[in-house]
Image (cartoon, coloured by chain):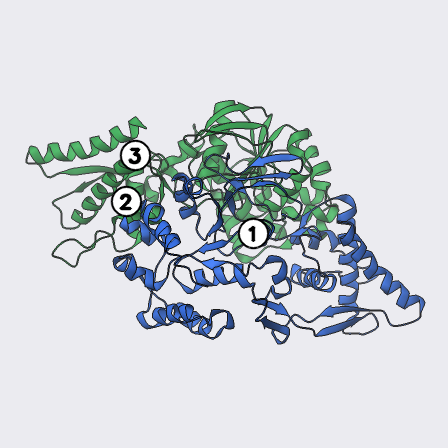
Chain colours: A green, B blue
């Protein structure tokens, strides 16, 4: 954490130097708009390009955001010094005040303070979690993993039916023991509970994680750390619909809005092990499909054009969905029996290496 | 669980007896509409009245739901026998099929199967969790609690920053050790993480639970079991707005739509320890309030009329909100410093017994 504090201090010191040299103080902020988001074919990730904007103190249009950036920087430095973590919303309230002798607020709404936090992340090349700021929190984990966290030794294989609630910040977790063949990420908690109850992770020596929908940053970072630090393959299991497939792609490649941190959160080796349109035929799920909505089809048509869905297999699945206008949920597998997913579907797909990349 | 299986078998046997006696088979289903929801002043709970409707096999309007009720009953019996838990959505898929030589489906949509599950809960006086069916899942817990769950011993005081992910079904959890002065239920995860990091639960010997919004059934049942089995006071801490106060009232009294299980999920001894409009003055939060929306005001006006908000103190708070047209979030306390909530706000309110009932 010394590095984080150092970076925040340097930010302030650079401004001081400008002032002492009678220069107009400025801060370099990499541009985050779509024009500067690039698909990095080699790294297989959505990353930020090289465009940088300067933010000046003496500039009518920039003075306020300049002040806000320094306020937030000072706040983050205080979080480091006091060893406190907090949420984006709390940060907004902690910094919100009316400037003396004016009607001007430091921040009027959280929609003003959130982007400033992202500015700091990008400018300092730090995760907001490293700045001790956290967003929403979801996700659960079980498996043969033992961690040390805030002095506690937690064994993910001995948490009963509940599992470990993944916190928003997993930076400081120390892995004491990780014994697994792969990580299986599941979109829906219901399937996670099914697999957990059927002891799937014990039988297959897997780490089970449910993202409970779109993966929160804590979940993405946990997957990434486990995968990269222990060289574990990652399989992602979602519904057969555009939304589910997009959840997979965000875990793997990152997202457009968070492209500046793909390297810290992305998992380029992740493979898709969830429901496909082809599975509907292969596993006799025809009676359990759902009619795709207009919005699903439109989304699939957009995804056809994404560089990261250009593989033959994905193009085929997306086209099949558009053509047949159907989708299917993981729960559809229960149409073949409640343990079909544990005993037949997943083992068959894993055995045949029936993954999409 | 023998009791559950017995009740399901009795349901089927009674139908068989009717058939053998050449009677039109029927099932008694208590009425769940608003007309049969009553405020039980003595028990301080929303409960179901005595109205019962009969569902007949030989009745054109009822034959399908009669069939569905028996299908679901048989499915639940199978869940008991196989020791499987599943979700409402999986149950729908598991039972969905087209009847032979017809175009008729057993269930077309989950909106048909969900009410049948509730019918069974009410008719058999069982929780869906006892029927091995679970809905959504949210919520986390830390504190001096040791449980036995599926053979694992889990110590809620040694789970690092994460806490225990509360599962949807907590019926079969065995409490091995519970050492606490009270249970503190927090609406928002951000405050839960703040209190957890500040070791509030250790200092005050409390069990901390976050409901992450409206409390899921697993969370409500966990609170109720801990509170009733160990005679622990329950304090609920939410935002100062109609939505937050309603979360509190559901934990305490139950809800209209789930009035048939208030006795199993309600916590009549729960007290409100969260933000009030009065707190805004008492704790100098005037700069951190939010303008109440039309919908907040309307909701507060409705709540003024509820029997369970008739205390002088609640009437005062609701009227203050309507009059001043403001609300406040828990995060507003961060305006007074990030540890204000841990070091000043909560200890002061607890010391002064500044609760609403």
Q: Tag 1, which chain?
A: B
Q: Which residue is mark 2?
A: A116
Q: Residues within 10 Å of mark 3 (few under 14, many from 20)?
A: some
In the rendered image of this protein, does residue A30 appear above or below residue A351? below
- The percent coordinates of residue B246 (x first, y second) are 47, 63
Q: Quadrant of residue A244?
A: top right
Q: Tag 3, which chain?
A: A
Q: Alpha-carbon distance for marks 2 and 1?
A: 47 Å
Q: Secondary structure at mark 2?
A: helix
Q: Which residue is mark 3?
A: A80
**Quadrant of the frame with the C terminus of chain A:** top right
**Quadrant of the frame with the N terminus of chain A:** top left
Q: Are marks 2 and 1 in contact (CB under 8 Å)?
A: no
Q: Is residue B186 left or right of residue A111?
A: right
Q: Alpha-carbon distance for marks 2 and 3?
A: 18 Å
Q: Is residue B309 left or right of residue B90?
A: left
In the rendered image of this protein, does residue B117 appear above or below residue A356? below
């Amino acid at each position: 954490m010394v590095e984080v504090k150092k970076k925040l201090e340097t930010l302030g010191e650079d401004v001081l130097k400008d002032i002492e040299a009678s220069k107009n103080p400025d801060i370099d902020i990499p541009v985050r708009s779509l024009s500067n988001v690039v698909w990095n074919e080699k790294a297989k990730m959505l990353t930020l390009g090289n465009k940088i904007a300067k933010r000046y103190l003496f500039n009518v249009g920039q003075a306020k955001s300049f002040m806000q950036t320094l306020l937030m920087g000072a706040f983050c430095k205080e979080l480091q010094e006091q060893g406190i973590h907090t949420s984006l919303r709390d940060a907004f309230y902690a910094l919100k005040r009316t400037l003396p002798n004016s009607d001007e607020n430091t921040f009027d709404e959280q929609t003003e303070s959130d982007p400033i936090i992202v500015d700091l992340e990008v400018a300092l090349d730090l995760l907001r979690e490293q700045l001790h700021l956290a967003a929403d929190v979801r996700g659960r984990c079980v498996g043969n993993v033992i961690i040390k966290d805030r002095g506690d030794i937690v064994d993910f294989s001995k948490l009963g039916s509940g599992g470990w609630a993944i916190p928003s910040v997993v930076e400081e977790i120390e892995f004491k023991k990780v014994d697994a063949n792969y990580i299986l990420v599941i979109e829906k908690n219901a399937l996670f509970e099914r697999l957990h109850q059927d002891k799937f992770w014990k039988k297959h020596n897997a780490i089970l994680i449910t993202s409970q929908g779109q993966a929160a940053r804590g979940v993405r970072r946990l997957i990434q750390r486990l995968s990269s630090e222990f060289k574990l393959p990652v399989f992602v299991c979602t519904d057969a619909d555009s939304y589910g497939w997009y959840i997979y792609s965000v875990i793997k490649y990152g997202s457009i809005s968070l492209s500046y941190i793909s390297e810290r959160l992305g998992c380029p080796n992740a493979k898709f092990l969830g429901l496909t349109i082809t599975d509907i035929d292969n596993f006799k799920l025809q009676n359990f499909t759902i009619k795709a909505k207009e919005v699903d089809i439109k989304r699939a048509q957009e995804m056809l054009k994404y560089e990261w869905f250009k593989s033959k297999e994905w193009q085929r699945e997306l086209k099949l969905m558009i053509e047949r206008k159907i989708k299917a949920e993981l729960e559809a597998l229960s149409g073949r029996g409640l343990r079909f997913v544990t005993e037949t579907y997943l083992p068959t797909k894993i055995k045949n290496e029936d993954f999409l990349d």
